[in-house]
Amino acid sequence: MPTPQETARLEQIKKSWQQKRQITERLGKIKTKIGVYSGKGGVGKTTVAVNLAVTLASQGNSVGLLDVDIDCPNVTKVMGITDKPDYVDGQIIPSEKWGVKVVSMAFFQEKEDEAIIWRGPMIHNAINQFLQTTDWGELDYLVVDLPPGTSDSPLTVMQTIPMDGFVVVSTPQQLANIDAKRCINMIRKLNLNILGIVENYSGEVFGQGAGEDLARDIQAPFLGHMELRAAYRDSSKPTVLLDDDVAREYDAVANAMQNSLKELGRQAV
């Protein structure tokens, strides 16, 4: 007879296997899954994720955007979306705006400034719940806005979602690139793909070129610069829909990212 400890361990293994099977089924109609990731907060990761998703949708792709930054979910704010997802027969039906399907922890907060004070296991369970119950339907791309850093939250996402590759966001400052290297090392230790580096906040204020230096240093593609522009002050809609220069920057980044996917044999086809 197995001991109570052995029985509990077997039940946990069975539960984990069932969760993985359900997640695989939920993501089965998604052709390409892209993580947008950074080594630290404040580098504009969410802004890049949102504008990249909207750019891919404007190119004629079917796109979803999953915000798994559980502590600080900001995707809904940048998207300008307030309609909450529907919940039908135990399934989350994503909200949709600007041609992008959206699911975020922000939809499930009572107050926007509410602090989510959760330990690792609770965050792990929340991420799994999103993945198990969201019905994305058929998508060309799912863009995943990850939590920053190299702790339990991004690790959970990387080990749970079969990502096709990661776009790493940094800024021209030296400290940002040091932190970016940490998250790049995490991606590579997990044997996952880096699609390329994006340098955000480029221009006269913070400088330019450190992102390209980082890309050369780690031998990864450089996807492009995002200049620090006044257009980002307008929060009425994603900036690619407001400013032609920003739209051109993101078109270039999206095309470069798609080339990286093609070289890896992971493009949406």
Image: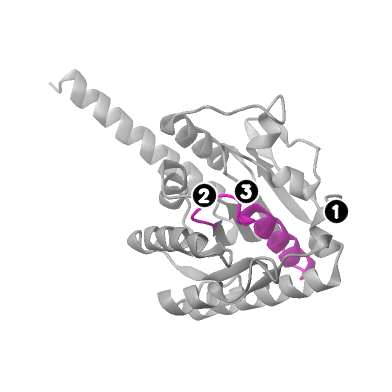
Q: Which residues are magenta?
A: 37-61
Q: Nearer the viewer, mark 3 or mark 1?
A: 1
The crowd level at tag 1 (other Cα within 10 Å; few <14, some 14-19, many 20+) is: few
Q: Residue furthest left?
A: 1
> Do the residues under discs 3 and 2 have CB atoms within 8 angstroms?
no
The residue at which mark 2 appears reads as 148
Question: Which quadrant, please, contains the N terminus?
Answer: top left
- The answer to whether residue 247 is left or right of residue 33 is right
Q: Nearer the viewer, residue 90 or 53?
A: 53
The residue at which mark 1 appears reads as 234
The residue at which mark 3 appears reads as 66
Image quadrant in which you'd find residue 240: bottom right
Disc on the earlier residue, 3 or 1: 3
Image quadrant in which you'd find residue 114: top right
**Residue 34 falls within the magenta-colored stretch:** no
Kind of residue indicated by mark 2: Pro
Q: Secondary structure at mark 1?
A: loop
Image quadrant in which you'd find residue 169: bottom right
Question: Which quadrant, please, contains the C terminus?
Answer: bottom right
Q: Which mark is residue 2?
A: none
The crowd level at tag 2 (other Cα within 10 Å; few <14, some 14-19, many 20+) is: many
Residue found at x 71% / y 24% = 110
Query: Residue 190: percent from the left, percent from the top?
Result: 35, 59
> Do the residues under discs 3 and 1 have CB atoms within 8 angstroms?
no
Q: Secondary structure at mark 2?
A: loop
Kind of residue indicated by mark 1: Asp
